[in-house]
């Protein structure tokens, strides 16, 4: 009994080992968006219709990322894809050849010397900028050196990445915008429009040297020809809410032709009434005023619009 008692007291005297408690600091759930390197290489544009604001494009699309992002995860914001050929399809590298029809908002203020920016705008279908962002891949972006666009000349190209939100409090989406500038062919514009109009103006102003009343019929026919040319050229563009270069140019042309017509009417009136003094005065002042005023207005127009 003494032995049992001694062993029990010894066991009670031994302290129990302390329990180890591990405290783990809370971790923030921070996830970075998936980065996709995107590139668009345009082979050519076709069928740019100013009236409808549409253009057809043939281009290559490159997608490089750490995730399996494909064309099915994206959408062409400013148009619709007609056909797609998959040229490379690996988990981190996609390459497509795409034929698409895209919308364009033409700016016709300089028409018929108008310039436009054709864009290819690509955006994720569902992934916002918190989960996917684009980075422009300069090595896979550009315009083919042999690209031809009948009636147009290529200007500068560029790209930008922007965040676009569809609502005030909505999370924005990353959007890749590839820009290709074009302008109407200058030689074609001059030959088809400005050369006929300038010939009409030259003939009309030259008629001021005529002191006979028969010049009235010549000026009337020149005025009618200018109206017909204006109608034909203006019919190629849609109605817009602002004045184009063509509109102001033709206003100056009409003003010039009207001044020449009025001077011819006055000259015929005073000639028929044998008032030679007034007829000579109309003749002299017409030559001195109308050509300088007309040329000055044309110069101001070209400097103001095409600077």
Image (spheres, rainbow, N blue to C red):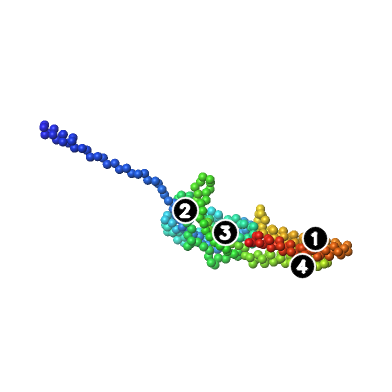
Mark 4 lies on a secondary structure that is helix
Residue tagged 4 = 206
Earlier in the chain: of badge 3 and badge 4, it is 3
Q: How many marks?
A: 4
Judging by the rendered image, the residue that carries numbered circle 2 is: 133
Residue 230 on image: x %, y %? 71, 60
Residue holding disc 1:
262
Q: What residue would you read off at disc 3?
A: 118
Of label 2 and label 1, which has the lower sequence position? Answer: 2
Tell whether label 3 touches label 2 (CB within 8 Å).
no
Of callouts 4 and 1, which one flags the residue occurring earlier in the amino acid sequence? Answer: 4
Residue 228 picture quarter: bottom right
Q: Is residue 118 visible?
A: yes
Q: Is residue 127 left or right of residue 115?
A: left
CA gap between label 3 and label 1 equals 46 Å
| Front in this rendered view, residue 89 or 307 | 307
- Label 2 sits on a secondary structure element that is strand
Residue 89's label in the rendered image is none
Which residue is at a point 55% across and 55% down the rendered structure image?
A: 79
Q: Earlier in the sequence, mark 2 or mark 3?
A: 3
- Element on which disc 1 rests: helix
The quarter of the image holding the C terminus is bottom right
Report the side of 190 relative to 75 (left or right). right
């Amino acid at each position: 009994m003494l032995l049992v008692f001694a062993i029990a007291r010894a066991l009670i005297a031994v302290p129990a080992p302390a329990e180890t408690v591990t405290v783990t600091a809370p971790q923030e759930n921070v996830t970075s968006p998936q980065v996709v390197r995107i590139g668009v290489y345009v082979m050519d544009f076709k069928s740019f219709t100013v009236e409808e604001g549409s253009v057809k494009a043939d281009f290559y699309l490159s997608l490089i990322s750490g995730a399996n992002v494909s064309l099915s995860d994206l959408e062409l914001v400013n148009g619709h894809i007609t056909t797609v050929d998959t040229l490379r399809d690996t988990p981190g590298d996609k390459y497509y050849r795409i034929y698409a029809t895209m919308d364009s908002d033409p700016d016709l203020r300089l028409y018929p010397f108008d310039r436009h920016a054709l864009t290819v705008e690509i955006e994720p279908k569902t992934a916002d900028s918190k989960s996917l962002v684009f980075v422009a891949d300069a090595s896979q972006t550009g315009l083919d050196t042999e690209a031809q666009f009948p009636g147009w000349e290529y200007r500068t190209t560029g790209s930008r990445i922007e965040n676009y939100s569809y609502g005030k409090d909505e999370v924005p989406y990353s959007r890749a915008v590839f820009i290709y500038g074009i302008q109407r062919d200058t030689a074609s514009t001059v030959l088809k429009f400005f050369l006929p109009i300038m010939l009409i103006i030259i003939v009309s102003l030259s008629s001021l040297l005529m002191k006979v009343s028969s010049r009235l019929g010549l000026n009337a026919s020149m005025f009618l020809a200018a109206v017909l040319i204006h109608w034909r050229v203006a019919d190629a563009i849609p109605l817009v809410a602002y004045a184009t270069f063509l509109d102001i140019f033709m206003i100056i042309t009409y003003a010039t032709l009207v001044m020449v017509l009025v001077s011819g009417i006055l000259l015929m009136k005073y000639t028929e009434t044998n008032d030679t003094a007034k007829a000579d005065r109309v003749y002299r002042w017409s030559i001195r005023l109308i050509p300088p005023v007309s040329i000055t207005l044309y110069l101001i127009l070209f400097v103001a619009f095409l600077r």
